[in-house]
Image (cartoon, rainbow, N blue to C red):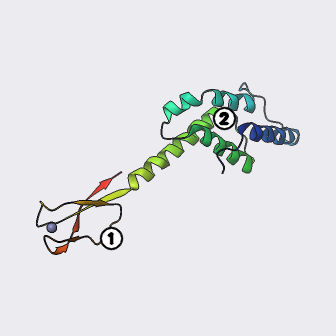
């Protein structure tokens, strides 16, 4: 999905779609503001959301969520709550991805004075001229 996609254009499309859906299946009256007002409120508070979820691009996540809702023809009563869950899930998966990245430290087991080298690959062939043997992974670093 293009990040530059225009939220307003997307909102307009959703509004039209929802008007159509409303005719087919009127939403139960709730005390929550309309979807447009709820999304506007999220947009106005992008900075606040960013503080809560610093690892995420909030504007992009909002676009992704709106896109997902539209693609799946889903309607929510409480978009803020849904967005909060959406961000929580996204940030968990990002943290998991970061955690899963390992770096491997290659060195010589018999000679600690040999230079150590880090690599993100665990199948490197690094030769030590001093020991005249191949360096081995002596530890791995997470994140
Ligand atoms: Zn060595």
Above or below — where is 105 with respect to 36? below
Is residue 62 toward the left or the right of residue 27 in the image? left
Figure quadrant of residue 59: top right
Query: Residue most toward the front?
Result: 129
Q: Quadrant of ligand 1?
A: bottom left
Q: Which residue is mark 1?
A: 123
> Furthest residue to the right?
23
Which quadrant of the structure image shows residue 114?
A: bottom left
Residue at 17% x, 72% y is: 129
User: If you read the primary sequence from the N terminus, does the residue marked by circle 2 or circle 1 appear first?
Assistant: 2
Give residue 35's position: percent from left, percent from top: 73, 33
> Measuring 84% from the left and 39% from the top, which residue is drawn there?
16
Task: Pick whichever, 53 or 132, lies toward us.
Answer: 132
Occupied quadrant, residue 120: bottom left
CB at disc 2 and ligand 1 closer than 8 Å: no
Badge 2: few (under 14), some or many (20 or more) residues near its Cα, within 10 Å? Answer: many
- Residue topped by disc 2: 79
31 w.r.t. 105: above or below: above
Frontmost residue, 4 versus 36:
4
Is 142 or 112 nearer to us in this picture? 112
Query: Where residue 45 appears, x then y in whole percent?
Result: 60, 27
- Residue 97 in view, yes or no: yes
Can you give x and y, in whole percent of width and height, for residue 6 in the image?
Answer: 72, 40
């Amino acid at each position: 999905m293009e990040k530059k996609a225009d939220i307003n254009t997307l909102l307009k499309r959703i509004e039209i779609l929802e008007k159509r859906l409303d005719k087919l299946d009127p939403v139960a009256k709730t005390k929550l503001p309309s979807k447009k007002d709820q999304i506007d409120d999220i947009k106005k508070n992008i900075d606040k959301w960013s503080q809560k979820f610093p690892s995420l691009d909030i504007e992009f996540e909002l676009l992704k969520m709106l896109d997902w809702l539209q693609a799946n023809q889903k309607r929510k009563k409480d978009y803020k709550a849904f967005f909060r869950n959406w961000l929580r899930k996204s940030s968990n998966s990002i943290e998991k991805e970061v955690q899963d990245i390992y770096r491997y430290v290659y060195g010589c087991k018999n000679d600690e004075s040999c230079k150590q080298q880090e690599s993100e690959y665990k199948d490197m062939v690094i030769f030590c001229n001093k020991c005249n043997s191949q360096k081995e992974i002596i530890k791995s670093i997470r994140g």
